[in-house]
Amino acid sequence: MKKQRLISALTVAALVATSGIAVAQQAGNVKSLRGSQVDEYVPLENNARQEERRFVRNYRQQPPLVPHQITGYQIDLNANQCLACHDWSNAGDRGAPTLSMTHYLDRDGNQLDTVAGTRWFCNQCHVPQANTPALVENDFQASN
């Protein structure tokens, strides 16, 4: 009985695979989203580079943008490499801006000695800055 089920299952699998190949062959010339063949070289447009100067904020209480590379920074449940420079205990020695005191408040408003868990993942709010064109059209105006 088990052997017969196995043979039936293999037969169905073979039929599905064969029909899939037939459908793919009937599809004809499938166009890529890039508009070129997969093996064709497509030159990239100029990539935006991160600027090392500080950008002004566009609205009140906008999280500051990160003016330096953070590629490879470890930010996970066990470590946060940003704190090596920006924690209040290190910032003075490193010449880095300190975290806002709000980063040391728990969700009940209690003052903590370490960064609150709700503020641990810096790159949720703080992103590397780059002067790039808008991805979608918009009419955003920075506040005064």
Image (spheres, rainbow, N blue to C red):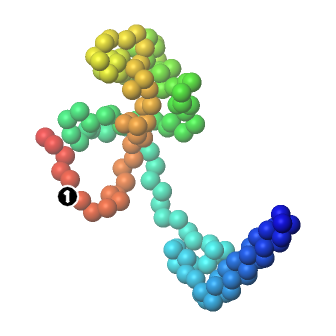
Q: In the rendered view of the protein, which quadrant contains the C terminus? A: top left
User: Which one is nearer the viewer's eye here, 40 or 53?
Assistant: 40
Spot occupied by residue 117 in the image (x, y as percentages of width and height): 42, 23
Spot occupied by residue 14 in the image (x, y as percentages of width and height): 77, 77
Residue ID for mark 1: 139
Can residue 32 be seen here? The reply is yes
What is the count of numbered marks? 1
Which residue is pictured at 24% across the width and 59% down the height?
A: 138
Q: Where on the picture, by quarter, is residue 71?
A: top right
Say left or right for 77 vs 23.
Answer: left
Say left or right for 79 vs 132.
Answer: right
Amino acid type of disc 1? Asp
Which residue is pictured at 70% across the width and 77% down the height?
A: 16
Q: In the rendered view of the protein, which quadrant contains the N terminus? A: bottom right
Which residue is pictured at 52% across the width and 78% down the height?
A: 35
Q: Is residue 81 above or below residue 105?
A: below
Say left or right for 37 vs 34.
Answer: right
Which residue is pictured at 46% across the width and 49% down the height?
A: 49
Spot occupied by residue 93 in the image (x, y as percentages of width and height): 46, 13
Q: Is residue 139 above or below residue 100?
A: below
User: Which one is nearer the viewer's eye here, 109 or 92?
Assistant: 109
Q: Is residue 104 above or below residue 26?
A: above
Spot occupied by residue 51 in the image (x, y as percentages of width and height): 41, 43
Say left or right for 128 vs 6.
Answer: left
Can residue 101 be seen here? The reply is no
Which secondary structure, mark 1? loop
Most extreme residue toward the left is 144
Q: Residues within 10 Å of mark 1 (few under 14, many from 20)?
A: few
